[in-house]
Amino acid sequence: MHMIEEIAKAKISRRDFLKGTVAATAAMAGLSMAGRGENALKAHAESVAPVEHAEITDIQSQGKWVTGSCWHNCGGRCLNKVLVVDGTVIRQKTDDTHEDSPDFPQQRACVRGRSQRQHVLSPDRLKYPMKRKNWNPGDGEKHPELRGMDEWERLSWDEAIEICADEIHRIVQKYGNQNILIPYGGECQMVLSKMGGYRSCWGTNSRGAYTSTPGKVGFWPQSNEGINDRIELRKSDVIILHGCNPAWSSAGNPAYHLLQIKKHNPNAKFISIDPLYNDSAALVEAEWIPIRPSTDMAFLLGLAYTVYKLDEAGEGLMDWDYLNTRTLGFDQEHMPTDAEEGAHSFKEYLLGELDGQPKDASWASEICGVPVEKFEYLARLLSKENKVAYLTAWAQARTHNADNLPQMHMTLGAMTGHFGKSGHCWGVSAHSRNINGGYYLCGSGGAGNPSAQNPLPNPTINDTECWEACKKGVAIHNSYGAPGVEVPIDLKMVYWGYTAFLNTREGTSAGIEVLRSMPEFVLSHSMFRTTNAKYSDIVLPVTTPWEKAGSFLQGNREALIMATKVIEPIYEAKNDQEIANLICAKIFEKYGEFYPELTADPVYPLTEEQQFMNSACGCWYLDENHEKKTLISITAEQKAAYGVEGEDQEGIITFDEFMEKGLFQIPRADGDAYGYIAWQDYREDVNNNAAKGNSASGMMEIYSQGLKDMVNAMKFSTIEAYPTWIEQEDGYFGTFADRKLGGEKGEFPLQIYNPHYLRRSHSDFDNVGWLREAWPNPVFLSKTDADAAGIMDGDTVQITSPHGSVLRNACVTGRLMPGVVGLPHGSWSDMDEKLGVDRGGTDNIICGGISTGAGVSGWNTGRCNIKKFTEYQLPADVDRSDMQERILFE
Amino acid sequence: MATAFYFDMTACIGCKACQMACKDKNNLPLGILYRTVQSYEVGEYPMPGVYHTSLTCNHCAEPACVAKCPTGAMYKTEEGPVLHDDDLCIGCQMCVNTCPYGVPKYLEDKKITGKCDTCIGIRKDGGLPQCVAACPMRALDFGTVEEILERHPDAVGMDTMPFMPESDTRPMTFVSPKTIVSADAVEKFF
Amino acid sequence: MNEERREIIELLLVNRQFCYSLLYHAFGREPDAAFMSLLLAENTEENFALLGGETLECVPAFLCSLREKAEDSGFLDQVRAEYMRLFVGPDRLPAPPWESVYLGEDGTLFQLSTLEVRNCYRSFGLLPEEYPRVADDSLALELGFMSTLASWATDAFRQNQTEELKKYLEGSEEFLRKHLLRWIPKFLERLSKACSEGILYPKLCRILDVFLKKDELVLKEILE
């Protein structure tokens, strides 16, 4: 009772106090909360009885399991279900729709998928349109130098759309469409496609040299399905994993499928050729053959030479029949008709007849680091008599000057005849087809959306060249093999859509430099304050797939996932398409006379629901006769409920059942109708046109005039028509002072590459605390190199390349080849502005924009030095947010 | 009757999906794990070895935590699992300090301890412990000791492993170990 | 109830109505001139002083220094920027102002604690204006809820609706105990650590923390 007593004793005029307080409260109540509805309560008319607290502990029974999209580009696309109670997400589970077995496995989610709710419901989600404080629209001051460091102001959607419309119009009119960059992101591109166009980027992304080369050399389309299916793979006796690590690169079932090979064939020989003794190798107890990154061409040449020589000596390793009848260009007797005058064959190069250097084991060993004696050993394992599955991946083709590498794999595979026979295969095991090759057995239909048509002539810039081109003011337009044409660029605007470009393409340091000086306007659609959003002027919050009507997802060939809406869009987030519609509508309203392509109709006319239903109607599967059949039974009423007109359709699973399960999966078994042996038709009938690759000759071209002419016309760097070793600027030779092997080491004595890492799918998920806790994202150092630099496990290391400098804490390991540094791919940039080092350990601070050949991204060609960092100990990433803020407030 | 977890070390790739599924199901804050994956390195370049462990409560036959709990909050069920009654817990942390395996975790916010309950609620509805249901490598299993030994005849007691501390609590966890498991292995954070 | 006691209770009810309203507006939107002038008005000290103890000690000094700083032309910009950094984004929020981040354990939004808070609102016929797009357990919404109940309690008291009054006060006390008092100290700790140089919000949050504890006592006393 003492408070009342004390007030009773206090010498205040209670009457005055009361009067004053009432007045002050009234004044306070008069303050407007307009535009801040997220912080206001309203009376609600619903007579919903509150859920009793006691019941909340037994929340499961009240919730509904919904399939939440796991949309990230890891290749997995597994089943993720979430328990939703009154708009809140309580927990997750994965596939329990059917009994699990190796042949008919559940589509179990990985460590990332299991933390998806942490990702979608993170307090870090962007909630409102925001504007950088010192950036002003129109003729106002822009202060580009403050990008990434400025304060922010909140905008209403109306204000934001108006500013965006005004700025886009102003920049188009003042500077022209050619100076507006929209690297990727269809919705943003749609806006500018109606206003005269934009500059976009193109790149080789995941596939590296497998993007353009296979189509020219006749290793396509099968290179993308170039390995046998998972059940057929169990019949192989020698399994070579060359830079193939499904355990880290294709989470989900692929590593499990790899294990099945061992379980079915306990005597199978596994070999792992990789800079790291990776977890896939450890899983199958593979023999590890360490190799320097970005030297795979030299290794394969050495191996091809050894195979040839052993065969010549009578060991019978080669499949001459296949080589002579299914390929062209191995020797002068089998040159393609389109070969240029005086053309040399691959064999002449291999044997050293052209340059005096036989590409023998000792030559190769000096470059790639694989011991000389391993070449004969491997060559004999590759004998045509052995059932060999040679599984490579894209990583080694994400290197500089790698254009002939897929051709080299094809060549060695053809020499040893491991194409088209049960138990044999040679190709790419990666992404959604890791340890499971073959065509898709089911799929979804199109959503029915229009796609942006860019009216600007010669509009593209290669990813690797983007920032350097902006600095120089001139780019080479040569997308996907087009002859290079120089085009000027004076960057005035960047519009980021669904891409993490600044973080995930080479030259992040140069990108930041460009963004801090050149454009007048940088606009970003984003879910989070990604690296793109950080250096923007306006950020617009977008919805995740959990907040959209529904979608279909597919990873491996056997399963199709139907994901549906989990929650309403949070805060003020909008669908990217809606943003495009709003901006276009505003531009039409204010400046319609300038843009005849714009009309009063929305550029995206379909609702989310209509798009979802369109995709559902088009879902298909292959029956046992490989006929494409309608998958989902949907009634006309169900279609109408989603705003789609149409009649009843008959499939093998009802719309409701599919939605409830979230999964359609074709059961598999040995001997079923869905087995796949890559190149089988081609081997069996060379005249079967349908089975041919799409080279000029239709054959596998070990000499490919088409490849040489295409690449050399692109104006980055030149190649031969057959596989050759090309020294790379940032490659192993670049670690020596005079680029002389075995000489003195230079300023950047170590090689560095970027393994995929389970904390992230590319850059997605990097802000998830649970994942940061599980996967600390160190830099991997060999014990030899760490000792030499005086670095212990856990020490903070500064890694510096010719392109930038990053910090990471060390994981010193015997699993990494000495001379090689492993920096995990995809972490978000977090610049220490004072010291100019990136605390995030972003791989593309280390990788610079170097454009070679067919514009292949070269993330695994890098060099660096390391030193113990003594300014401060880098906190664990899971604790690092505190540090960001402290520096921000200084 | 006794129940047990089983871990197939030869199939584990250390991906931590089990750890995450457990964290999600139990809604655990940063710093608290009921199931933990650890990675160990043996040997040296160019002949290194790596193996992972995935450990949670061993649901011991003679649990020290139960013996020391002053309130009966920690108790052994007839079926086998050692469970924890949150309402009886006074947060004294006797279990935390007693368990030789460091299993019970003190939950700062709730002022009580917590640990693996074998997802007993989910199991009652016919489901699997979430770690078992999560494992992309199918390296985890749960069942009665008899079922486990029948399904995994080569399994040995987890307490035979060098990374397990000495104790007399009779842990009920089984493992198919890799041959390279060694007392000289070094824990690594990859 | 004697007249004096009744008068003092009214005073306390009106006083907490003011304090909640002030704190609600403080955390509910970026500061503008109108809000700052109300915050810096003389009565603010007196209203907090009425509760005695710690609040009395820190409020006058804080307001005094704030009044000084408010003379600077850039002051409003500065405090607005502080609000953006702490509560809006787009940069990672150092101390996200949602209960579930502290009690939901997994650090995300829209958790069980969110649902519990929503149920409290529902039981008084309230919901967030933007339901279900916003997390119900944000600091601003929770203070808005307390502010609304405080104002209803005053009205009920004046109209001698004893049952209603009891319902509002008990509801307030329960909400304080089960929600605000459980997470605000953690929130304050994180905020203070992350933003020790802040001009406005770290101190306002400290005042909030002390005020909530005082208010629990006030409610208990009135309810007795």
Image (cartoon, coloured by chain):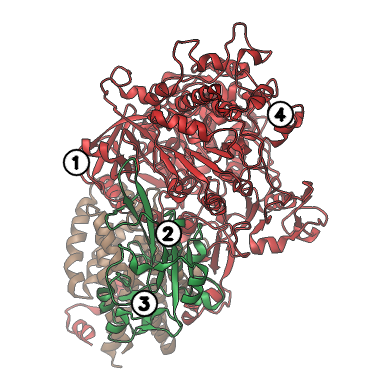
Residue that label 1 marks: A871
Q: Is residue C63 left or right of residue C102?
A: left
Q: Which chain is green?
A: B
Classify 10 Å Cα crowding around label 4: few (below 14), some (14-19), many (20 and above).
many
- Looking at the rendered structure, the secondary structure element under dot 2 is helix
| x and y, in percent, of residue C14 in the image | 33, 76
* Residue at the farthest bottom position: C1
| Residue type at the position of mark 1 | Glu
Which is more foreground, mark 4 or mark 1? 4
Residue that label 2 marks: B9
Residue A41 appears in the picture as rendered = no
| Residue type at the position of mark 3 | Cys
Write down the chain letter for disc 3: B
Q: How far apart are marks 2 and 3 (CA)?
A: 20 Å
Write down the chain letter for disc 1: A
Q: How far apart are marks 2 and 4 (CA)?
A: 44 Å
* Residue at the farthest right position: A647
Query: Are the numbered discs 1 and 2 placed on the same chain, yes or no?
Result: no
Which is more foreground, mark 3 or mark 1? 3
| Residue type at the position of mark 4 | Lys
Residue that label 3 marks: B60
- CB atoms at circles 4 and 1 under 8 Å apart? no
Mark 4 or mark 1: which comes first in sequence?
Answer: 4
* Residue C175 occupies quadrant: bottom left
Residue B72 appears in the picture as rendered = yes
